[in-house]
Amino acid sequence: MKYAARKPFPEGFLWGASTSGYQVEGAWDEDGKGKSIVDVRTDFPHGTTDYTVAADHYHHVDEDVALFGELCLKAYRFSIQWTRIVPDGDGELSAKGVAFYHRLIDGLIAQGIEPIVTMYHFDLPQALAEKGGWGSRATVDAFVRYAEELYREFGPKVAYWLTINEQNMMVLYGSALDILDGPLNREVSAYQKNHHMLLAQARAMSRLREMVPGAKIGPAPNIAYVYPESCKPDDVVAASDFNAIRNWLYLDVAVHGRYHPIAWAYLEARGLTPTIEPGDAQILAAAKPDFIGFNYYATHTAAAPCGAGDEAAIEGGDPQIFMGEPGIFRAIANPHLKKNAFGWEIDPVGFRITLREIYERYHLPLLVTENGLGAFDEVAPDGSIHDDYRIEYLRAHIEQMQWAIADGVEVMGYCPWSAIDLVSTHHGISKRYGFVYVDRGEHDLRTLGRSKKDSFFWYRRLIEANGLV
């Protein structure tokens, strides 16, 4: 649908930016922090750094928050590291870890920035992984206790909460990336672990309402709408199948408390249905999110399977570059889309479509929790960083988000990835996303100084104008 003009963004729109704890904080073993599964990871792509120092946000928190204030952010979406709060995942709190996040949150509030807290972003405590991880229902109980501690400590200051970041990516790619249980507990189906995470999420949602009345909470999956390659009916079925498996399985349970029927049929056909114990259905049904957070980078395109051996299994590496699954779909490159330097397709119009599809299905306000362009940024001799490619990417997506608002979609905020350069899962620090440049290489920490990119000034002007001008 085309309109004569875009609708303005609503007053109070949460113009923000995002990071995750383990990718930005560093200080991985300081002040009593326990090890998480990302801390013990060793299989980094050749030539890329680990997360031990990252962007050293832990030691630059005041400077970084001041920069976020200068950027005029209205919101900052970040994750709390479970093992910085509860070092072993299920025991005593770390006073110093709690104090760090109070310092961060207080600094944000002083700058007029709304803190948006993600409770879990891939960083399961290693001690829990060694006891069964997400394959054990004991981890569900530990997560709920962790959530309760967060609510007690930070509930009076934090109005917006996100439960689990990209749960669907952990299920589809967790073994390849060691972000589900690390290399442990692989004898337990990822979909059994997924069921336990869904229970943990539901119980955490219900506890927030009991402990912090008025606060809002939602899930934060990665949603990539799947197009059919053609209008051939078999291609449409393949795309519908993968939409159900990749996207709607997770949101249907989070919002409605029940499994998507096509996704459940897939699990039955593959022998992957989880064990559901008495009372689980009631727990899932009782949790009602206030909004849906989601990460968007690109759409995908699927075609009907041709026969045995024609599709590679979904098991490899980059969650934005999909391979097919035998008997379900073939992954197809979309000839109408450009790709970035890392092979990811770029689809701003697909962002509008994804917003529409989510809102049409669930009728809840939407918060964009990640969207951004990774690139090999270069520093000019005068110290400037000219990232016009990032500006163009963000401009195109924000424009399409505004068209989605004209379509009637209720969008409450936009938090692109990322506020500051951080360590990417696949390409280390070299793949930069931030509005703020961090002076370090993969294995050379250099000064760790902060510099504003051209996109910093562009985004600030956009926020001040409450949208594109």
Image: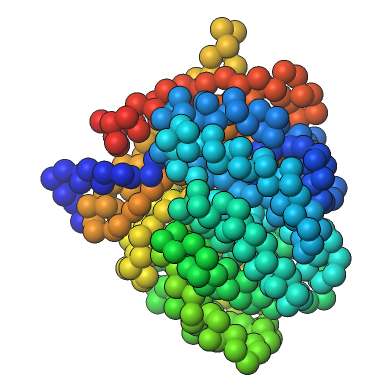
> Residue sitting at 30 percent across and 37 percent down?
467
Give the total number of marks visible in the rendering: 0
> What colouring style does the render use?
rainbow
Residue 210 x %, y %: 50, 70
Residue 390 x %, y %: 47, 32
Q: Residue furthest bottom?
A: 278
Q: Is residue 25 above or below residue 445?
A: below
Relative side of 362 to 43, left or right: left
Res 422 seen here: yes
Relative side of 463 to 71, left or right: left
Q: Nearer the viewer, residue 295 or 79?
A: 79
Q: Is residue 185 above or below residue 147?
A: below
Q: Quadrant of the N terminus?
A: bottom left
Q: Nearer the viewer, residue 112 or 320?
A: 112
> Residue sitting at 42 percent across and 53 percent down?
367
Q: Nearer the viewer, residue 445 or 319?
A: 445
Q: Residue furthest left?
A: 4
Q: Is residue 334 above or below residue 135?
A: above
Res 268 seen here: no
Residue 427 x %, y %: 69, 39
Q: Nearer the viewer, residue 52 or 172?
A: 52
Residue 379 x %, y %: 60, 17
> Residue sitting at 70 percent across and 30 percent down?
59
> Residue sitting at 38 percent across and 57 percent down?
366
Q: Quadrant of the C terminus?
A: top left
Q: Quadrant of residue 359?
A: bottom left
Q: Is residue 60 above or below residue 270?
A: above
